[in-house]
Image: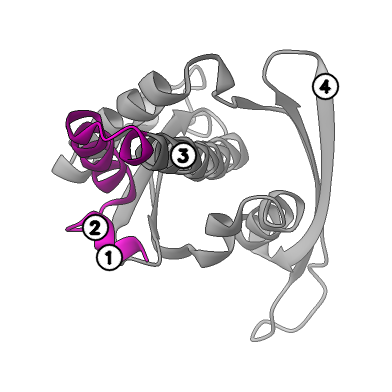
Amino acid sequence: MSPVTPEELKKDRNLALIKEVLGKEYMSLVAKSLTMEEDLLTTADSAHPVQTTLKIKENDRGRIRTLKAQGVGIVDSVFQGLKEYYGTEYESLGKINLSSFTVTANNLKAGPSPEGSTAPVEVVLEFQNAYNKCVPFREKSYSLSSSVVAALISACEYYINAELAFRKLRGLIDDSRLRSRGDLEQAYISKIVNIVGVSSYEDLF
C-alpha cells in the first residue's frame, strides 16, 4: 500500500468541513451492484467498448439509482455514467477530469488464495477540477472492479457535496452581508475557499 499523500490528508480535512456545513443534507452514495459487458473480439490496437450498469443506493434510504453507460474500459464507462446521471444537477461533475490512475497489487501472498490471484488491489484515482486543484481518491479491496467503482463513487460523492456546501455557504455569505455581520461573512468565506481550493473567494466569480 502506497503512503497517504498530503493531498489526501487535505481532502479528508475538507470532507470533514463539507460534512460540518451540510449536516443532514450530506448526500451519501454506495454501490450496490455492477454488471459489465466488453467486446474482446476487436483488433488489438482499437478501443474496446464497455457497457456498464451500475446500481447505486442514495442516502441509506433504500432508493436505488440505475446508471447505464458506455465507455472505453470500466473506468471511462462508469465515470461517464456518473457524469451523465448527476451532471445535470451538479455542474461541477462536468468540470473535473481524471489526471492520474494507478493500480497496485504488490502483496500477492496477502489474499486467501495461495496462487496470488486473490491479492488485495489498491486503486488511486486523481481528479483535477476547474481551478486546477487535484484531489486523490484511494480504495482497496480483493476486486479490481470493486476498487475502481468505489473510488469513482467516492469522487462523485465528494464533488456533489462540495457543490452543495458551496451553494449553502454562498447563501449564508449573502445573508450575513445583508445583516452586516462581517464576522460571519469572513468565517463562511474561509470555509468556501478551503472547500473549492482557490486562493480567494473572488476567484470563484
| Element on which disc 3 rests | helix
Measured along the vertical axis of the image, is residue 21 above or below residue 163?
above
Along the viewing direction, whichever of 46 and 91 lies nearer the viewer: 91
Q: Is residue 39 visible?
A: yes
Instruction: Name the foreground residue: 90 vs 29.
Output: 90
Kindly identify which residue carries mark 4. Answer: 63
**Mark 3 or mark 2, which is nearer the start of the sequence?**
3
Q: Residue furthest front?
A: 179
Q: Which residues are magenta?
A: 176-205
Of labels 2 and 3, the one closer to you: 3
State the residue in front, 114 or 80: 80
Residue 177 falls inside the magenta stretch: yes
- Give residue 198's mark: 2
Q: Give the x, y percent position of residue 56.
A: 74, 31
- The residue type indicated by label 3 comes to Gly
Q: Earlier in the sequence, mark 2 or mark 4?
A: 4
Q: In the rendered structure, which amino acid carries the disc numbered 4?
A: Arg
From the viewer's perspective, is residue 102 above or below residue 31? below
The residue indicated by pointer 1 is 203
Residue drawn at 60 percent across, 41 percent down: 149
First in residue order: circle 1 vs circle 4: 4
* Residue 24 x/y as whole percent: 55, 14
Q: Nearer the viewer, mark 2 or mark 4?
A: 2
Label 2: few (<14), some (14–19) or many (≥20) C-alpha neighbours in 10 Å: some
- The span from disc 3 to disc 1 (Cα, nearest Å) is 17 Å
Asked if residue 47 is positioned above or below residue 171 in the image, the reply reads below
N-terminal of the two: label 3 or label 4?
4
Q: Quadrant of residue 102?
A: bottom left
Residue under label 3: 171
The answer to whether the residues at label 2 and label 1 have Cβ atoms under 8 Å apart is yes
Which numbered dot is residue 39?
A: none
Q: Measure how far apart labels 1 and 4 are at the Cα level.
A: 37 Å
